Structures are given as structure tokens and as C-alpha cells.
Image: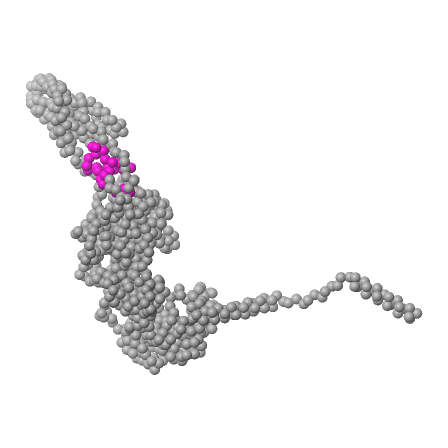
Amino acid sequence: MTQKKETMSRVSKKQNDKKRRSQPVKKKKAPTRPLWKTIVFGILIAFIAALVAGAGLFAYYAASAPELTEKDLTGSISSDLLDDKGEVFYTLGGQNRDVVTEDQVPQVLKDAIISIEDQRFYTHKGIDPIRIGGAVVANLTKGFASEGGSTLTQQLIKLSVFSTDEADQTLKRKAQEAWLALKLEKTYTKEQILTFYINKVYMSDNNYGMSTASEYYYDKPLNELSLSQAAMLAGLPQSPNTYNPYTNPEKAEKRRNLVLTMMVDNKKLSTAEADEAKAVPIEDGLIDHSGDETNNLVFDSYLKEVIKEVKEKTKLDPYTAGLKIKTNLNMDAQQQVYDILNSDEYIAYPDEDIQAGVSMVDVKTGQLKAIGGGRNQEGQLSLNRASEMNRSVGSAIKPLSVYGPAIDYLNYSTYQQVVDEPYTFKAGGQLYNYDRSYRGQMSLREALIDSRNVPAAKVLQEVGYPDATEFLANLGIDVTKWNGETKGLVESNAIGGEITPIQLSAAYAAFSNGGDYTDPYTVSSVVLQNGQEIDLTPDTSKAMKDSTAYMITDILKDTVNSGTNKDLVTISGLPQAGKTGTTNYTDEEKAKYDIPSGGVPDSWFSGYTTNYSISVWVGYDDKYTDGHWLSPSSQQLPRKIYRSLMSHVSASVENSDWTKPASVVEVAVEAGSNPAKLPGPNTPSGSIVKELFVKGTQPTSVSTSFGEELKAPSGLKAAYDEEKDEISVQWDAYSLKDKTSKANYVLTVDGQTYETSDLSYVIQNPSEGKVDITLAVKANDKTGPKASTSVTVPEKEETEDSSADSSSESSEDSSSQSSEESSSESENESSESSSSSSESSSEESSESAPEESSSSSQPTNEEAPDTDEPEKTPET
């Protein structure tokens, strides 16, 4: 039994095993890893990969790092600046440097430098991971470049090997800088590195090294500096010109106080010591340099542009690269600019605060020959108003933004007619002319000469903003940067945009040279230490047609010779062209700042010859300060400055007038015709003007306004009524061929002239005796030949009866005589026509002269600024 159970059990087990094998096998589920572990693992892998990639990239960049020598650390090679005659006028960098040794640097200066520049200087190995991390966080939270991660060692590397320009701070440059800093720390001690830095940094006003700066600012060696003075010097290297205590005392004091605060944080000072030093005025102990030799200030503004241009175009540091910089400076012209702006020999300035900006360009090359950055400058490389101050140029922009494009794109002539009338901006608001009046229909020439705002706004709409913008861009003027957030031209800035004197002089130069534009430049070439010469001459492009350049110039020649310009600008024997510009305060600003009606913020003049283009701005840096507005007499200053400079520089060159190109034709047209028409055979000379047209667009149709030959009227008769004591005159109607015109009649009775459209006239109480009567037809401002007759008024009796009898008899005799004379004249009219025509011509000339004069469309020769009236330049 037991055996049987065992057998059945084995059979059952086999069956069960077979059944299990026939079923799908279920795999065991692997344990699941938490999500956070997966994320952390992924980040770790990515971090390791980034480290490996970063290390590889760092090694790649470091391998190409330049060699660093002690010569690089201890000094720099100065650069020579040559004028346009090839003579050295300035040596930049290196020459003004006093070197100190480690033991000559006081501890207070070391503490100040370390506290503000690199508090972990003595503990890091050239690069500071903590500082780098802080910079990364700051850049992520406050924006890129909000904080730097460079150590003092890295800053020394920049000063010695690399450019300090922010644009050059690339990842590659940073890697090379860090690698060289690590190498430097292995080669020199911390004190040596700090001393290198102290001797290397630029300290403003052409001073290099803190020892030089200590002598310049305080006339004492480093070891005699006070705490306040040491803090001021320590704060300068970050931005030497910004923190210069002479030119920016408020910013210099703020920076010094920050250094003192950081010294407290770095446990180098107590709060009480820092507060005591902060209480010292920033000017305390400063040496007065006002009596120093000012030769450098003569060309200071030009020097500033040279340094900027070399850095931008070559990426080299002119202070340390040992360059030979060939500039375009005309030293004679530069000295003249300086003397005009800084003495009373040429111009009587109203006060010391009034400022000016001057730019002089060679129109053939685009070279900047002289620059005036301001008056009464104190520090070197200070504000250059010729290149850095964008102020509205008023109407001086109109040739560039309106009339130049109209001629260039629309083939407008200088005669093109436009109506000066009330005008409202598309955005709302009334546009006014400088005189708050309107002159009606006028030519483009008249509108520009008289600086009318309304015609300019109208022509701008006809040109269109895209073409006007393109025309300005061709002249180096980017309108997208105007008026803050406003992108591009609008009605108001197109007749008063913001341009620097340098930009304006270069743009006007294109009018002078036939339409070619070259970016204004101070440096022609740079010669490196190895002898390689880099040409920095910019390309010249065609900015406009030669027809446009000549026609605008022709109008601006009239501007120079009109109104007060005739006395303020003209130079005997020198062909010139030019345009004034004046801006206005708004009514709200006048009320708020108590500005008189004649006060304006800015006055300009831009003029040119076939050799030079000069632009001058005059105004105040702060135009809202009490009294800082230009009076009518001060508004003349730009023209006076221009004339003083232009007369000087033109005396040593050959001057010629502009030659009309083949693309332009001069045509006599009938004034007032619209569109332009050629004069008819009888158009009075006073109604004929000569204007310029783009060849192929000149008028071909002849005006008929003065074309109909007038004849003497017929049917003229006169009779005296003794009872009424009056002469009645009658005549036949005159029929004109031009049915659109109307005839009037000019009646002359005994020397007294009457004009009427009727066919009869009565003269009351005529004089006794023979009365001569003539009649002529007048149409289209022209008077024809005369018909004539006469009548005799008898002697008038005083008694009533005799008077009546006499009147009756005389009336009969008079009537008879009048009839006979009229008949006789009619019979002889044909035979006398020849003499009558001659007589009529003579009389007509005499009588019509005033009419012709009044209808002349010649310009009034009075431009808005030239009458010392401000032009209206509305705000956007």
C-alpha cells in the first residue's frame, strides 16, 4: 500500500512538472532605482563630462598662449603719433613712468589695493575659484559682465600681454590669461607681482604707475601718502578717466570711499579710521595744474579720437604696443581751433560756461584735419563734444534728410514748387515756421534758403521715409539711434535730428566733392614694431548723384550770401556753401525754466568750400541751468567761429568754385508757373528766374501767361454834362483770346489813374479846360497800348442864369468837339499805330515795372537763423 502511494506520488509529480514546463515562465522583476538617484547620477555624469571637456578646451587654449617675459611686466613700448607732415607731435605711453621697488611701497597702499582688487591675493595661486564662482553667480543673477572674476595677478597679465578692451574678453582669452597667471605665480613672489602691478597701471592724464601718479596728484612720494590719498590712488586703475579727481571729483570721492569701506571689510582699518578718511575732501592735497604747459590740450580732443580709432581698428593698445601712428592732424589748423575756442582774440564769448564743438574735414579724402572738443578744458582726454555730444542740429539736417533725397530720388529741380501753409503733424500738433507765418507757393530753393519748416515736412512726405533713411545712411548717419526708443525717421526729427559735429562735417563734405562719402578718420596707417604697415584708410562710396551734390551746393551758396550770413560768414574771393541750424525749447520748458522768447538751446553752422568742410555747435552742456540759453547774439557764434577758422585754413590753399556737371542744366523759367514752364515771348524779365534741373527733366512747354499781345481798346468816347458837372467816359468791351483770364481797364483822366472792370466811368467836378483821357487794357499783369481822347470843360459861371446858359452852350460845343476828336482819332488810328505802339511800349514799361517787381519769385534772401530768429524744431 505504501509502495503504491509512492508510485502514484512519483507519477503525479511528473505530471505536475510537465504541466509547469508547458506554462510560460515568469521572470522575476528587478528592483526599481529611485528617480532622484537617476537625476543625480545623470548630473554627475554631465558634470564629469563637462569637466573633461573644459579641461581639454583649457589645455587647447593654454597651449597657444603667448610668451610672458619680465620686459612685458616691467614696462611698455611707447607709440609715436605723427601729424600730416610726418612730424612726431606726441608720444603715447611709457614716457611718463616712475618705477618703485618693493620696499618703497607703503603698507597702507598695499592694503588699499588688495582690499579693493583681490582680498585673497596672498592665498590663491593666480586664479581664485571662489571669486570665479561669485562672478558666475553674479552674471547669472544680474546679467553678463556684471562682475569679474579676475585676480590681481590676472589683471597684471591683461596689462602686460592682452588688451583690456571688454570686447576682447573671450573664453579663449580668459583661459590663456588664467594659464599665464598660474605660471606667473610660480615664477615670482606675491610682493614682486604686486609691485609689477603698482608700476604698470594707467592712472589718467598720461600717468603710468602709482609712483608717477603720487607725484602728479599730490607732489609727494608713495611713502608719504595719507590714508585718504592712498585710497584714491588704489581706486583709480579700474577706470582712470572716470575717477580722475580733477575732472570728476564726485565720482572720484565715491570710489575712494568704496576703497575705504572694503579696507574695513578686509580688516585693514577700523570703522572710525575709515570714517575719518572719508571726511577728507577729495580735493585735499591735489596739486593745481592749471598753470602747466597746455600744449597737450591743444590737440587733446584729436588725441582721444586717435586712441579710440587705433583700438577699434587694430585691437592693439597704442599705449603699450610701440606703434608709429600716422595721423591726419593739421597742426596749424588744430592750433587755430584751440586759439579760437580758448581766447578772446577772435570771438567775444558771453561767459566761461558756454561750450562749442568743432570738426574740420578734408572734403577730398574724408580726413579729419582738426577737432575742437570744447572750451576751457582742464583734464586730458576729457569730454569731446565734436564726437561724443549728440545734440539736435535743427535745420542743418534739411539738406541731408529732405532736399538731398528729393533731388536724388525724385529728380526735383531747385525750382520745384511747394506751398507753405498751415500744417499739422500726422501724429498731431501744429508745425510752425520760425516766424509763425506762411508764404504760400515757393520754390524748393526759396524754402531751403529761408529754412521753412512746413515745406520741408511736405517734401519729406513726397520723398518717403525709406528713401530719406537710405540717403542719410549713405552719409554715415544711423537714424535708428535717434530719439531714445524711436526707431527711424519721424516728421520732427527729419527736420531736426541728433548728429555730432564730426558726422555733420563729413556728410556735408559729400555735397562738396560731387557726392562721394568717406567715414571721417584721424589715422591713415599704423606701423608695427616689425615694420609691417596697416592701412586704416576707409573706403569711399557713392552717397548721391553728382547732380544732387551740385544742386544742393548751388542753393547753399545762396544761403551763405543771404541775410546776416552776408556779414557773418562770407569771405572775400572764397566760394562757400553752408547752412545754419537752430533748435528751440518747448513752451513748457520755457515756462518751467524761465527762458525768454528769444532764448534757444543749440545753434549750428555747417559750411564748406572745395577744400574743407567745417561744422560748429555752440550751446551749454546743461541747457536747463539758469541762464544757460543762447541769446540772439550768442546764436551767431557758430558762424563767427566757422569764419575765423575757414578764413585761416583757406589762406594757404588754392580755392576754386564748383564746376557744374554734365548731369545738370540751368534753365530760365517763368516764375510762379507750376509745373515749371519756359518763359513766353512776352514774359517780363522780372518774372523770369534761372534754376537747375537734372538733365532730361527740364521743362519744354512754353508759358502762355504773358503770351497774348494786347491791343488798344476801341469805342473810347467822353462827354461833359454841364448840368451835372461831370464827365462820363465809355468804351467797348475787350475780348481776350485766353478765356480763363480777365481784362481790367486802366483809365487815366487828366493825370489821375483809375482801374476798373466796368465799361464806363464818371468823373465828378472836373477841372476847367481841356481834359486828356487815355484807356488801356490790363491782363495777366501786363498792360497794353492806350487809346486816347479829350474833352473841354468850359469856364464855369458863378451866376445861376449865366452858368446855366454857358453850360448849355458849352455842352453842345463840348459834345461836338468830343465827337469830332474821337472820330478823328479813330480815322487816324491805323496810320498812327506804329508811333502809338512805340509810345505804348514806353508807357507800359513805366507803368508795369512795379507790378513786375512785386510778382518776382526771387528768394527773399533771408533765412530763419540768419535773422537771428529761432527755427521751430518740435519735439517728437
Residue 198 occupies quadrant: bottom left
Residue 771 screen position, x and y as percent: 10, 25
Q: Nearer the viewer, residue 509 or 748?
A: 509
| Residue at 24% in and 38% down | 669
Q: Quadrant of the N terminus?
A: bottom right
Residue 13, quarter of picture: bottom right
Q: Is residue 149 above or below residue 700?
A: below
Q: Is residue 744 left or right of residue 224?
A: left
Q: Is residue 125 visible?
A: yes
Residue at the image position 50 percent from the left and 70 percent from the top: 56
| Residue 334: x %, y % from top left | 23, 62
Query: Is 361 part of what is drawn in magenta?
Result: no
Q: Is 409 above or below relative to 822?
A: below
Above or below 598: residue 221? below
Q: Residue 852 falls in which quadrant of the image?
A: top left
Which residue is located at x 21 percent, y 38 percent?
Answer: 688
How many numbered marks, from 0 up? 0
Identify which residue is drawn at 46% across, 65% down. Answer: 141
Q: Is residue 274 visible?
A: no
Display colour scheme: one colour
Above or below 269: residue 141: above
Q: Find residue 752 and report its horizontal and vertical position in percent.
A: 13, 30
Q: Residue 594: horizontal and vertical position, in percent? A: 27, 55
Taking 54 as reference, is 764 left or right? left
The magenta region covers 668-694
* Residue 688, magenta (yes or no): yes
